[in-house]
Every structure is written in C-alpha cells, then in structure tokens.
Image (cartoon, grey):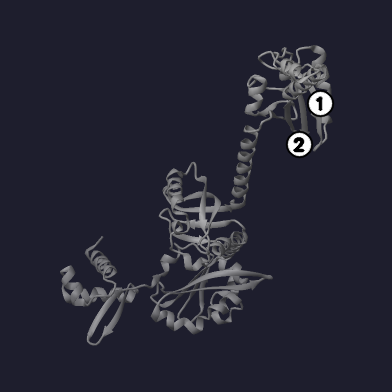
Amino acid sequence: MDTRQETIKKIKSLLRIHRNGLTITDIAEKLRLNRNSTAKYLEILLISGDVNLNTYGPAKVYTFSQKMPISAMLKFSADIILLIDNEMHVLDANENALNILGVSRENLIGNPIDTVKSPLIARLAIPNVFEDIQTAGEIQREFSISQQNDDHHYRMRIIPTVFNNLDEGLTIIGEDITKQIRFEESLMISEARYRAILQEQTDVICRWRPDGNITFINESLSRLIGISGSDILGESIFSYILPEDIPIIKEQIATITPVHSIHSIEIRLIDNQGNYHWYQWNTRGIYDNAGILVECQSVGRDINTERQQAKKIRESEERFHMITDHSPFPISIIDALGNYLYINKFFTQLFGYKIEDIPTEKDWFELAFPEISDHKEAMLNMGEDPSHSISGEIRSCVFPVTCKDGTVRPINFFRATLQSGEQFVVYEDLTPKKESERLQSVLASIVNSSNDAITLYRNLNKPVPHHSAIDT
C-alpha cells in the first residue's frame, strides 16, 4: 500500500472513532500531517463520498460518511434490492425485487420510480422522502400490503448511497417478514390463550422469583387474597403464607434442581379475610441457559375441605376405637374375604387370642369349635361366605366357644353386615346369665324342700356344688 492510500486509511479510521467530527487542524495534529496535505486528502474523501462536510460558522467539521458505496451492496442478502439515482430513476434491481414487484427488468430499469405500478413502491413514497433521506440518513419502515388475497409484511430500509460515478442516490433494501410476523402473531395468540387458561383455572397460580418476589398471579389467587395481579407485582409470596409454613417452602426451593424441577407440599395461604386455607402447592423450577433457577411457578389446589373431612374421619376413628376398646363386649371386624381387620381388647381378654393368632375367621373357628360337627354348624349358621349377607342385616346365634385356656363359654354372636361388605361382630358372654339361672334354680329347690325357717337357714349355708359354665 502506497503512502497516499495509507494516509487516507488513517484519516478514515480517525473519523470513525470521532463520530462528532474533526476539523482539518485537529486531523493534521493527531496524524502529524501538513495542514495543506490534510485538506487535499479530505477533498478526495469528500468527492468519493467517504466523508461529510459540516460548516459551523467559520469552522469546517468533517465526519465519517454514513452513505454506503454501491460496491458494498453486493454483500447484502435480502429479498429486495433497488437502486435509485438522484433523478429518481431505477438504476438496477435484483431478481427477488422483480418477482415481488411483478415487473420485467425492461419495464423497470431506467423508468422513474413513481411510474412503477406496485403497492409496495407506493407505500414507500420515494418522491416525498428523497431529499430528507439525502440529508438525514437512512430510514426504515414496516408495513403490510395485500397480494393475491393474502397479506404480506415487509421491512424496508432506504439508504443514501454514493455510486461509482460519485452521483448520489438511494438504495432500497427490503425483506419479506410475513413468516416472522405470523409467527409473532401466533406466539401472541398462544400466550393470550395460555393466560386465558391460567386466569380461568379454579386452582391458584403464581409465578415468583427464588427470593419470593411475585411476577404473576392468576384471577383465582387474586380473588383469594383480594389484590389485583398488577398491584401485587414485586411483593413477596411469603407475605401470604402462614409464617410457620414458610421454612417448608424455602426448603422446597433448596431441593429443586433441573433434573427434579417439580416438588409438591401442603401449605396454608391467607385469604382477604385473614383466614388460612390449606393448599396442595406444586412448584416447578424455571431455569436459564446457564442452569440457574430464575423463577418458580406454583399451582395450588384447595384441599381445605379434604383436610377437614380427613380430620373428621380421624376423629370418628378415634371415637370408634375409644368406644370399642372400652366396650364390655368382645368386638371384631372381618372383611369380605374373612380376614380379621380388628379385634378389641375385651375379645383378647375373654377368648385369649390376639389378631396375630387368628388372622382369619376360619382360623379362629378351628380353635373355637374343635369338634368337627360344631365347626361345620357354626360356619353354616354364621355365614362363612359374606356374599350371601345383606347390608344392614343383623343375625344372632348362640354357640359354646372353646377359649385359649380351655374353658368353654356360651357366646351369643351378633353379626351385622356393613355397606362395604365387612362384618361387624359383637360377642355376648352368656356365662353369668347361665350361672344366675342355675343359682335361682338351686334356691327354689331349697325353699321348696324346707318346712320351716331354721331348715331353710341351714340349707342356704351349705356349700353349693360346682357345675360346668355351660350347664343349663
């Protein structure tokens, strides 16, 4: 590269750095050039269109030109390229421009731009903006036009240009952005649908940063806490959670990872009346490209009713166990397959068997009725097959039952079939009743055999002979 070209290159580089421009003196001092030589180089650059000259009073300030040399246009890849000279004639056009404008090269090149019959050219209004572009620089426009009953969207750039003959003109560079616009519209529609779905959800939905700052709530959560979605942005989600549950949710955040990004807990949210409600809180972590947790999205399902029902069930079970455990009668519950689900304490006290000893009713019958005939009769009368029982039906029957210690007791079986098909059985020990009846019989016999009070007194003080518990 010769000295002349090297100096011109240095001047252009210097003006690129100093966007506000420099005077001849400034450039000469910075590059250590002769002032007259600097002026000649700037004159060359001014003619070639590489620099602009602006006059401020007596001072002449040179700036790097924003105009684009025509040779650079070949480096652009676009849908449309049109070159317009300073008399607003079309100098050249690429094939894409010819196709989009729907004209032949012969009918376009050399003709005034305002004679080109195209809605796209008409929207650019070149005659009205030609001078403005020459002085103010590049402009950009986006618009849509109807072509073949379909809307097409274009982004057009109109750039002031210096051609090889140093004449000034314009270059029109355009691209068809129809697909991009339609994609953006589709994205907007999808986002609108997504937001509509979120707003219509009965579950509460909240997006929040790891520090607790809220970025979005849906309508359900807004109604619950009594604050609109726009007013709550930036507030902390922890302000609407029962304080004792906050450590639980913070622990949840700590355990969220890109691999395990969804976690579920139960927490209590405060409503606009100051009351707390239980929610099943499912949280998903949202990560950036670096794998850093940037946001959480939580979906909460109201489980207040479920927890109240569960509490009632627990309380009912507690009452049941309290009643059955302190019942003066043995009690058992047997499922539809004949397995023991429950026996109370008095059952074990009276018969001597724990539920581990007799997992099924059949196991207990084999022990309680060692005589084969009694066993079969008991199974037949008490209904070994629960499928033949009727819900709500109560049956009773009396059988002598052999206990674990070998004693035999007359037992009245009261069996009720529940709606679930399970059997609820209450056992009444008739031994005290039989003993009472025997004593009454002995007393009557003694009274009937006594002729006077002295004999009766002596007979009553005789020892009573022992009888079996199941004597009748």
Question: At 30% from the left edge and 79% from the top edge, which residue is drawn?
Answer: 53
List x then y, in percent, for residue 244: 44, 50
> Dividing the image into 4 quarters, which one contains the N terminus?
bottom left
Residue 352 lies left or right of residue 6; in this view the side is right
The answer to which of 6 and 51 lies nearer the viewer is 51
List x then y, in percent, for residue 461: 69, 16
Residue 315 lies left or right of residue 472; in this view the side is left
On screen, 86 above or below 244? below
Res. 70 image quadrant: bottom left
Say if residue 294 shows up in the picture: yes
The crowd level at tag 2 (other Cα within 10 Å; few <14, some 14-19, many 20+) is some
Give the secondary structure at mark 2: loop
Question: At 29% from the left edge and 81% from the top edge, which residue is drawn?
Answer: 54
> Dividing the image into 4 quarters, which one contains the C terminus?
top right
Amino acid tagged 1: Cys
The answer to which of 472 and 113 lies nearer the viewer is 472
Q: Which residue is mark 2?
A: 418
Amino acid tagged 2: Leu
Q: Which residue is mark 1?
A: 397
On screen, 62 above or below 325? below
The answer to which of 35 and 408 lies nearer the viewer is 408
Residues at discs 2 and 1 in contact (Cβ within 8 Å): no
Marks 2 and 1, how far apart in space?
18 Å
List x then y, in percent, for residue 402: 72, 16
The answer to which of 398 and 6 lies nearer the viewer is 398
Give the secondary structure at mark 1: strand
Mark with earlier residue (2, 1):
1
Question: At 44% from the left edge and 66% from the top edge, which residue is drawn?
Answer: 73
